[in-house]
Image (spheres, rainbow, N blue to C red):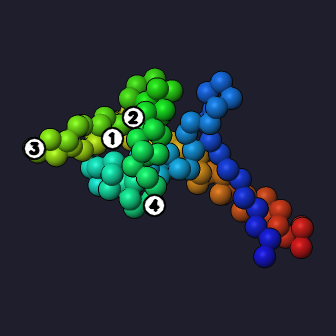
Amino acid sequence: MKELRIKCWVEDDGEKFYGPGPNELIKKIQKEGSLSRAASEMNMSYKKAWDLIQRLNQHAEKPLVILKKGGSHGGGAEVTEYAREIVAEYDQLEKEIARLIEKQNLLKVLK
């Protein structure tokens, strides 16, 4: 079955730093309150998730996720308001792209 797919991401100096994966990771961190649990849900290593959050925070104007070190009360991760705004905008963009694909109906022409 033919399927038209469009991927969307944000680049900084030619380097991808925000797209479907980071968007999903931030949503899972918000849900779980933990980077390790979010990474586990995505079948991603903690190290890869940690590196991804560090890169996101480095490229964004403001921090997206604040990581709290463990200890006697445990660690955790907090998604900032700025990150929630970015997630909402990205989700809206993906919906608009899906609507555009449906509207164009290119697949019917490509039978």
Pinpoint residue 20: horizontal percent, then vertical percent: 56, 50
Q: Is residue 73 left or right of residue 65?
A: left
Q: Does residue 98 appear in the picture of this structure? A: yes
* Callout 4 crowding tier (Cα within 10 Å): few <14, some 14–19, many ≥20: few
Quarter the C terminus occupies: bottom right
Mark number for residue 79?
Answer: 1
Q: Earlier in the sequence, mark 3 or mark 2?
A: 2
Task: Indicate which disc, 3 or 1, sits on the residue closer to the N terminus.
Answer: 3
The first of marks 4 and 1 along the sequence is 4
x, y (%) of residue 86? 46, 38
- What residue do we see at 36% from left, 54% from top? 38
- Say which of 64 and 73 sits in front: 73
As shown in the figure, which amino acid type bears the numbered disc 1? Answer: Val
Secondary structure of the residue carrying tag 2 is loop
Whole-number angstrom distance, CA of label 3 to CA of label 1? 22 Å
Q: Which residue is mark 2?
A: 64
Specify the amino acid type for callout 3. Answer: Ser
Give the mark nearer the N terminus: 2 vs 1.
2
Residue corresponding to mark 3: 72
Spatial CA distance of label 3 from label 2 is: 25 Å
- The residue singled out by tag 4 in the image is 43
Image coordinates for residue 23, horizontal then vertical, percent: 49, 47
Q: CA distance from mark 4 to mark 2?
A: 21 Å
Residue that appears at 65% across and 45% down: 8
Q: Label 2 to label 1, Cα distance in Å?
A: 6 Å
Marks 2 and 1: CB-CB under 8 Å? yes
Residue drawn at (65%, 24%), measured in percent from left and top? 13
Residue 73 sits above or below residue 15 on the image: below
